[in-house]
Image (tube, rainbow, N blue to C red):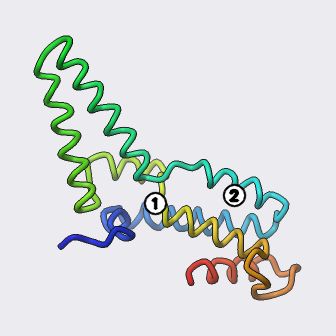
């Protein structure tokens, strides 16, 4: 069975790594509830963050190009590298898993959906979507309401 696009990476990520990524996102929103002046900076950081797909594509392209150049200039056996890389990239496109995925997830690379979730929670916290939850003095509840709003 082929998993849906939005879930395929998290389904092939270890539970511990998924929990850590979710906890980091939660901690970011809670911290920004107490430091709302830094939400704009964090949103700019999120705009520049590379998601797991972009990282895998850049990694695959680099390895395939390197293997091709080495195969054409030094030893034809290097051509096995782009063959393997493109096979793994195809596997990732279909199943959502490839060999570098667990390592990159452990390093903290997130899906576009996870990045967008944090972005929406921060925008909700900032008030971009109108008022949410409690008043401005209740930071923890404000963060909780922002996280719930982002899940919708």
Q: Earlier in the sequence, mark 1 or mark 2?
A: 2
Q: Where does the image place residue 60, in percent across and percent down from the top left?
A: 31, 39
Specify few, some or many for label 1: CA neighbours under 10 Å numbering under 14, 14-19, or 20 or more: many
Q: Quadrant of residue 121?
A: bottom right
Tell me the residue at 34%/51% (across/down).
101
Label 2 Cα neighbours within 10 Å, binned few <14 / some 14-19 / many ≥20: some
Q: Position of residue 152 (x, y in %)?
A: 56, 84
Q: Nearer the viewer, residue 128 or 97?
A: 128
Residue 97 spot, x, y in % from top left: 27, 57
Using residue 116 as the reference point, say whether residue 107 is left or right of it. left
Does 37 sit above or below residue 122? Answer: above
Question: From the image, which quarter does the N terminus lie in?
Answer: bottom left
In the picture provided, is 73 more to the left or to the right than 40? Answer: left
Left or right: residue 74 versus residue 66 is left
Q: Are marks 1 and 2 in contact (CB under 8 Å)?
A: no
Task: Name above or below for residue 63 compared with residue 55.
Answer: above
Distance (Cα) linking label 1 and label 2: 16 Å
Residue wearing tag 2: 43
Residue 41, label in figure: none
SS at mark 1?
A: loop
Give whichever of 91, 142 is nearer the camera: 91
Q: Residue at x 88, y 79 (%)?
A: 137
| The furthest residue to the right | 137
Considering every residue shown, the one lying at the far left of the view is 77
| Secondary element at tag 2 | helix
User: Residue 3: x, y in percent?
Assistant: 27, 71
Residue at numbered disc 1: 111
């Amino acid at each position: 069975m082929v998993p849906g696009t939005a879930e395929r990476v998290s389904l092939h990520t270890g539970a511990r790594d998924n929990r850590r990524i979710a906890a980091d996102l939660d901690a970011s929103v809670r911290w920004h509830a107490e430091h709302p002046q830094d939400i704009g900076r964090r949103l700019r950081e999120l705009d520049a963050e590379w998601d797991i797909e972009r990282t895998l594509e850049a990694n695959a392209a680099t390895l395939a190009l390197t293997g091709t150049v080495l195969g054409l200039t030094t030893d034809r056996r290097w051509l096995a590298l782009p063959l393997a890389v493109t096979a793994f990239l195809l596997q990732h496109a279909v199943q959502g898993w490839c060999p570098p995925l667990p390592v990159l997830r452990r390093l903290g690379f997130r899906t576009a959906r996870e990045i967008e979730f944090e972005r929406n929670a921060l925008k909700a916290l900032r008030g971009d979507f109108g008022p949410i939850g409690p008043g401005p003095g209740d930071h923890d509840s404000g963060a909780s309401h922002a996280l719930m709003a982002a899940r919708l």
